[in-house]
Structures are given as C-alpha cells and as structure tokens.
Amino acid sequence: MTTTAQLPFLPFSRPTIDEATIEAVGQVLRSGWITSGPKVQALEAQLSDYFGGRPVRTFNSGTCTMEIALRIAGIGAGDEVITTPVSWVATANVIIEVGATPVFADIDPSTRNIDLDKLEAAITPRTKAIIPVYLSGLPVDMDRLYAIANKHKLRVVEDAAQAIGSTWRGQRIGAFGDMVSFSFQANKNITTGEGGCLVLNNADEARLAEKYRLQGVTRSGFDGIDVDVLGGKYNMTDITAVIGLGQMAHIDTITSHRKALAQHYFHCFGADFEANTGAQLPVADTENSNWHLFQIILPERIKRADFMAQMLQQHNIGIGFHYAPIHLFTLYRERGFTEGMFPVAERIGRQTVTLPMFSAMTKADVERAVGAVKSMLGE
Ligand SMILES: *Cc1c(COP(=O)(O)O)cnc(C)c1O
C-alpha cells in the first residue's frame, strides 16, 4: 500500500485570498459604510475597464445577474429561451423565474457546450433569447452564436459565470456581444464569496439594471424617490466588492497559471490515455479557455460515485461533478422533460468528473491527481 492517504487533502477547487485583501476587508468593516458604496463603484469601474469600457453592474450572485438580464430584455410569459441541459441549474431556473419557458438543445460531445446546430433547430416563432454557457471556461463558436442570434433576431444572455479571462479571437469574453453575466461565487476563477456582474450594452440598460437590483428605486436630489418597475434586493456590499478588487489585481496571473496547469494535465495524461482507458479528456484548448474546470468523462465501466469515493478514501483527493443534466431534475420532469431527450447531455452528465484545478495548485498536485486517476482506471 502507498501512503497517499496521508498526503494533504487536495480539493477540486479552493479560493485564494491574499493578506492585502483581508486587510482591506477589515478597513471597510471599520469605515462605517459596509453596504453598497465606493468599493462597489470602484469594482464596477475596474470591471468596465477590463471589458473594454462597456457598462458593468455588480450584484449579489451570478444567478440574479441572469434573471435581471432577462428582465432587461423584456423576456417573460409566452417567450421561449433556449439553453444547454448541462449547466448549473441556475441557468434554466432564471428562465422559469421570469415566467418564460426553458427549451433545451443537446450538447456537443467534445466541447460539452450547447450544440449550435441543435440550438438553431430548436428556434420557434416564440423564441426570444438564448443563454449559452461556456462550460469550464471554453467559449462556444462566438461568430456562429451571434450569426444565429442576428439572423433570428434573438437576445443573447451569455452565462459566462465560469469564463472570466476567457477569450475569442483575442478578445475577452464580456468585451463584445450582447449581455454577458459572470459569477464571483467561491469556486469561480475570481471570487467575492458570493456575487456576480453583468456587462451591458448602454447607459439605459445599466440604469434598468440598477433599478432591478434595488426595489425599482430611482432617487433624485436630497429627497426625490420613485419606483416604476418591480425590482428586488440584489445589490453587492462594499465588504464583498473589496474582495473583488483584491482578486482583480491577480486576474491575469490566475488565468495564465490555470492554463499552465491544464497543459501539464494533458502532458501527464499523455497521448495514449484515452485509448488505454476509454476515458475522454477535455478539448485541448490553449487559446480561449480560462480553464475554470478540468473535466474528464469516465468510461461507462466505471461508476462515478465509486470513483469519487475511492479518490477521496484512497488518495485524499476531492472530485466534483459539473453537472447533472438539468432536464432530469423533478422540477423539469414535471414540465414534460424525460430521459432520452438529450442523450449526449445524459451520458456526459452521468460520467463527467471534475479534477482539482485552482490558482494555488502546483504542477506536483497535477501529477498527484493524474497518478491517482490512472491507477483508478487501471492504466
Ligand atoms: C456558478 C454558476 C452560476 C451561478 O452563479 P452564482 O453566483 O452561484 O449564482 C450559473 N451558471 C454557471 C454555469 C455557473 O458555473
């Protein structure tokens, strides 16, 4: 027996918060102003710079950003919104939340993102918007996506929750396109604990985003106040915004380190891994992805729950899975979705596992993870 169980726990994700950020949070807490204020404005300004000067507004989750984007686009009852069945359930829940109808299109087996041919085939006269997801940070073919959207006059709400730092033809995801939503949840490449931001097209959309995030309120002068749309309570606090500022300081290093870790994964798995084991590696993208996740598809002979349990018990490595197909959840079955509708999503949803990938990880950690996976799959 090896003694790998004595090695420290290696999770699939772990946030890194530097001491300067912890100190800055303390300063906000001592300042007398802890809700939305100057730190939120500073973070929005910095994000706007990062996304090529487009308007950006922050929120308290990456979920409400998408819900608000749908509201800004005027999506509601009677409208259909097309998305992928392989995402965090938030992506489809927000469609239901605004009263619209979620429609799924199956995924591409190699990118694991929505298959754009199937997306186009799912468009009906009631389709009003599409929500593509860039799983693990890998964008879809953005040229094709916007060609389809323009041809059919559809709004696009990009669920780029996992894709901060990803690019397409050298441009950052978020720096172009329609509305683009990011999440700063704890596992994401940069985090505020919980939070999110939405990149918008113009000042009118930004004003509407401000209303939807705070009870629909518009203020003027010392005591002017009106409410003309139904908003909610979705504002970010200065406590979390200052964490975001501390994270943004490292975004480029984080992205390049993750790319290097991904390349090391491919190097360690080697050219024969797929043929020898029947497992499937991700697309070996060295250009566009921010490598939010490193996911492999297990061969059918391996039960995922057993794999996860043994990786933990024998190797002290935490394995995640992203994601169970949304259409097979009870809430969605009750809306008429059934097994067999999206076979690629169902197969990948059953066999996908997420290996460790986070910015404080080392190449030795990658070697340890690959060694453990190979021993589990009998290579
Ligand atoms: C994290 C995530 C979300 C939700 O973001 P929250 O900030 O947790 O609300 C939505 N979609 C995808 C693809 C995600 O990874």
Image (cartoon, rainbow, N blue to C red):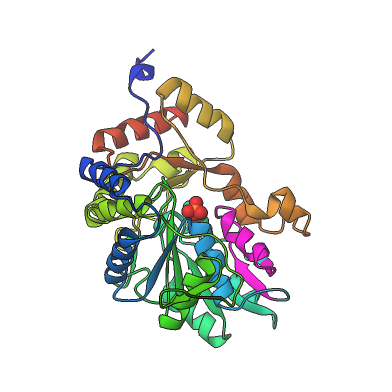
Residue at 53% across / 69% down in the picture?
212
In the picture, the quarter occupied by the C terminus is: top left
Residue 18 seen in the current view: yes
In this view, the residue in front, 2 or 332, is 332
Q: Nearer the viewer, residue 84 or 304?
A: 84
Judge by depth and name the residue closer to the eye, 103 or 29. 29
Q: Give percent across and percent down for residue 279.
A: 48, 42
Q: Position of residue 337 (x, y in %)?
A: 75, 58
Q: Residue furthest front?
A: 223
Q: Is residue 374 left or right of residue 67?
A: left
Placement of the N terminus among the 4 image quadrants: top left
For the view shown, which residue lies furthest in the top direction?
A: 1
Residue located at (63% from left, 71% from top): 81
Which stretch is magenta? 79-102
Residue 204 sits in which quadrant? bottom left
| Residue 144 seen | no
Q: Is residue 375 above or below residue 113?
A: above
Residue 82 falls inside the magenta stretch: yes
Was residue 314 drawn as part of the magenta stretch in this picture?
A: no
x and y, in percent, of residue 126 in the image: 70, 80
Rendering quarter of residue 22: top left
**Number of marks present in the image shown:** 0
Q: Nearer the viewer, residue 279 or 335?
A: 335
Q: Position of residue 295 (x, y in %)?
A: 44, 46
**Residue sitting at x 43%, y 75%:** 200
